[in-house]
């Protein structure tokens, strides 16, 4: 039985999370660390009561939303690692309860923060706004697309092209807005 209230609460927090990030990228607000910290504190309470919000508990969209909030809990690496272990256990028992791509992204997020090579190539960086995004170093890059496919991800090259295309669109919109104001 879907817990609709919990699903709504998760999705409401995701909206705030995404709004803050989009406004920051657009240059409209400063980065607000409090958003991630409040979400992490709240998610810890949720997980204590329900465990990880699996698809059967909150639906596909809200389960993915819970993962997104955890993905953004970079200030609490221990919590991210604990959730990753939980996600891996859930995946072993019932692959339909979580999105496997969420495991790949959280695995890489943790590894990059630990300054280790990532496994799936999901995390990207660039040196300046003029450069293209490139993935952080990847362990055994030759087989990365096989690992990505197993977790429901497109090829590394396809993903890199998508990320750069989306970022160019955001930057074009930002430049257009700046140009209008001048």
Image (cartoon, helix red, strand yellow):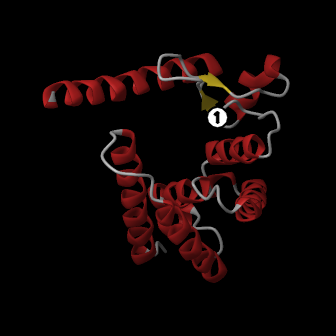
Number of labels in the image equals 1
Residue visible at 29% across and 30% down?
174
Of the pair 61 and 132, the residue shown nearer to us: 132
Vertically, is 110 above or below 12?
A: above
Q: Please state if 82 lies on the left or on the right of 159 as rendered.
A: right
Residue at image mark 1 = 123
Residue at the front extreme, as displayed: 182
Q: Nearer the viewer, residue 158 or 169?
A: 169
From the viewer's side, name the closer residue of 173 and 54.
173
* Left or right side of 101 for 34: left
Q: Please tell me which residue is depicted at 51% across the width and 60% down the height of the picture.
A: 33
**Percent x, y for residue 166?**
41, 26
Looking at the image, the residue that sits furthest to the bottom is: 49
**Which residue is painted at 80% across and 40% down in the image?**
115
Name which quarter of the figure residue 92 lies in.
bottom right
Mark 1 crowdedness (10 Å alpha carbons): few <14, some 14-19, many ≥20: many
**Left or right: 95 with respect to 99?**
right
Image x and y of residue 90, in percent: 72, 60
Q: Secondary structure at mark 1?
A: loop
Residue at the image position 58 percent from the left and 25 percent from the top: 126
Where residue 173 sits, quadrant-wise, is top left
Which image quadrant for residue 141? top right
Q: Is residue 57 visible?
A: no
Please say whether residue 38 is visible from this viewpoint: yes
- Could you say where residue 30 lies in the image, as x and y percent from the top left? 40, 52
Above or below, 158 against 114 in this view is above
The residue closer to the viewer here, 99 or 110, is 110
Quadrant position of the C terminus in the picture: top left
């Amino acid at each position: 039985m879907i817990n609709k209230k919990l699903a709504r609460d998760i999705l409401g927090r995701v909206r705030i999370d995404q709004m803050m990030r989009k406004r920051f990228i657009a240059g409209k607000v400063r980065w607000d660390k409090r958003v991630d910290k409040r979400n992490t504190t709240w998610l810890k309470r949720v997980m204590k009561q329900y465990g990880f919000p699996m698809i059967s508990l909150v639906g596909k969209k809200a389960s993915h939303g819970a993962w997104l909030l955890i993905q953004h809990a970079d200030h609490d690496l221990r919590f991210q690692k604990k959730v990753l272990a939980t996600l891996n256990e859930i995946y072993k028992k019932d692959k339909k309860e979580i999105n496997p791509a969420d495991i790949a992204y959280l695995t890489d997020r943790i590894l990059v923060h630990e300054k280790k090579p990532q496994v799936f190539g999901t995390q990207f960086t660039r040196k300046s706004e003029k450069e293209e995004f490139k993935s952080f170093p990847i362990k055994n890059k030759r087989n990365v697309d096989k690992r990505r496919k197993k977790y429901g991800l497109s090829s590394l090259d396809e993903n890199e092209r998508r990320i750069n295309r989306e970022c160019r669109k955001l930057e074009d919109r930002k430049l257009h807005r700046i140009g209008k104001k001048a």
